[in-house]
Amino acid sequence: MSNERKPLPIVEVLNLRKRYRSTEALRGISFSIGKGEIVGFLGPNGAGKSTTLRILSGLVAADSGEAKVCGVDLAEEEGEVREHIGYLAENNPLPEDFRVIEYLKYRASLKGLKGSRKRERIKSVLEICDLERKISEKRIGNLSKGFRQRVGIADSLLAEPRLIILDEPTIGLDPRQSAITRKMMERLRGEVSFILSSHILSEVEACCDRMIILSHGLIVAEGTLVELQKKFIQSVAFEIVSKAKKIELQRSVRKIDPQCELLQDDPVEITGRRRFTFNCSKGQETVELILRTLLEGNNFEISEFQVCRPDLETIFLKATKQNWQEMDLLGRGKNKISKPQN
Amino acid sequence: MIKGYWVILRFELFALFVSPATYVASFYFLALLGVGFRFFIESFVLTDWILPPLASLVVGLIFGAPALIPFLTMRSFAEERRLGTLETLMSAPVSNLGIVLGKWTASYLFFIFITLASFCFPLIISFWFPEQAESLGFDKIEQWVGTLTFLLIFGASFSSVGIFASSVTNNQMVAGMLTFTLLTLYLSVMMFYFGENIDSQFTNGPAQLFWSCFGAIFGGLNKMQYFSVGIIDIPTVLYQLVVTFYFLILASTQIDQVKK
């Protein structure tokens, strides 16, 4: 037996539940986050991502369950927990009348920083977030969205927290500004744990070590990208770019493999052509057979075909679709309300 | 327990001193008070006013408070709730009570600043017209101490009402109107019982206890006659402190509701 002790996780959540009047926002979720890990929180709107993050930041109290940050129980020592956390709220609310430097000084004082340490930390976060001197003297109300977001991130980094919670940090930012946020996370990788909630799946895929996918208050998938690919896409995915109609193409594909599944409900259409992504459980040979048959038929005007590695979007759609089917939210189940017949 | 109090106090004071609305409100308030005071002093000998002339300033400030206090308090929580910055503030390691007390102290200090500025009027008279000032009793230090104490304790409770009103809404105009309404109601009840001995309506039992508490809180204006001659009525001071803490605790509870 190994004597090596497993390091204490930074975040430990056990059976967390939260209800807002008639809506059950969280239905008993459990997960943990290790030191230095960057974890992506994904889920459709109303999945419970922001509620989870607000509970972990001590802004909202959970109805039941246990949440520990740096080994400290949130229910018992909420104030102490906040000392370990840097939080960037969704929409990043900031006071408009203050200059960036004044605001950061105020936030540093609130977080208990004093004297030379306060000065050093402010200087350091201004540098990390690329808020040069000219910007730091400007009023927050006069800043662009990107700079405001950087001010929010600078604030969350001030007290050298062990956990940084970023709720939609790149929403509304241009690609260059999003890249700066990613660069900042890369710079702190390994030292600080991050929880990143985002709808931009490519961003989560690029910078997160692990993903947690939520749907209707439940964790529907958790793991690294490779683990999720193995779990959800055991089969081969392939893409077809064609002028064909969805139903006709699907019918032709299913003649060869009846289990072959079209992953998008509404395939992307560009200049009259659509990109269809299928998932075939019978392996590479069947995929090749499907391609040959479609090309021989010559009715579909296929311009592109490729076997692809399933990305996070595919996994996300599959995981949430599975959850919706289980909860009968697609309206196809037995409990579907039918029109009364006279 | 009141973590973050000093930082929030400094920030709020700074916010009050940089806000043009506060200066505009203070200027008009002091100008009106000054004009009123001048006319009162000029016609003092013709009135049947039984209190010392300095008490006229107290009356002006107390009855002007429903118009002044909203300008000092309405922004504190309502604006933070509207912008969403209350959430950012609460994500820092500060206590709810620290936030409420910090914001209240800032508005209260501004009220004290205006009170002290209004006391410059009798000071100016004392400096330029020492004989007239003496005949009006402006040289009696006990009157200055008494009237100032009266204003300070009522200012504390009035500003706590304003802070509470600001904590229940995210619209500063609604907060301002609510403060105005609550303070006007409070003053109306005090005016209704002015000159009456409320606590002697019942001589024993729980009713007497109730009326003595009610009388102490709502009969506060009756005690102005003591304060204006330099007699500090300790129960009045204590009861106004109770009102102050009651509304501050209510505001803190209201902020706690945000977490639910």
Image (spheres, coloured by chain):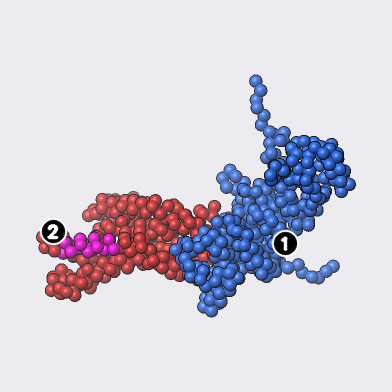
Chain colours: A blue, B red
Give percent across and percent down for residue B189.
29, 51
Q: Main secondary structure of the magenta part?
A: helix
Q: Nearer the viewer, mark 2 or mark 1?
A: 1
Do marks 2 and 1 share a subunit? no
Give percent across and percent down for residue B122.
21, 69
Tell me, yes or no, whether the two marked residues, 2 and 1, touch with CB atoms within 8 Å: no
**Which residue ends up furthest to the top in the rendered image?**
A342
Residue at 65%, 59% (x, y): give it.
A196
Residue A93 falls left or right of residue A128: left
**Which residue ends up furthest to the bottom in the rendered image?**
A116
Q: Is residue B155 magenta?
A: no
Task: State which region is magenta.
Answer: B27-41
Residue A51 appears anywhere in the view:
yes
Residue B48 is marked as 2
Depth order, front residue of B82/A137: A137
Q: Cα distance, mark 2 to mark 1?
A: 83 Å
A85 to A328, vertically: above or below: below
Give percent across and percent down for residue B1.
50, 66
Q: Is residue B28 magenta?
A: yes
Residue at 65%, 25% (x, y): give it.
A340
Depth order, front residue of B184/A276: A276
Determine which residue is flagged by label 1: A209
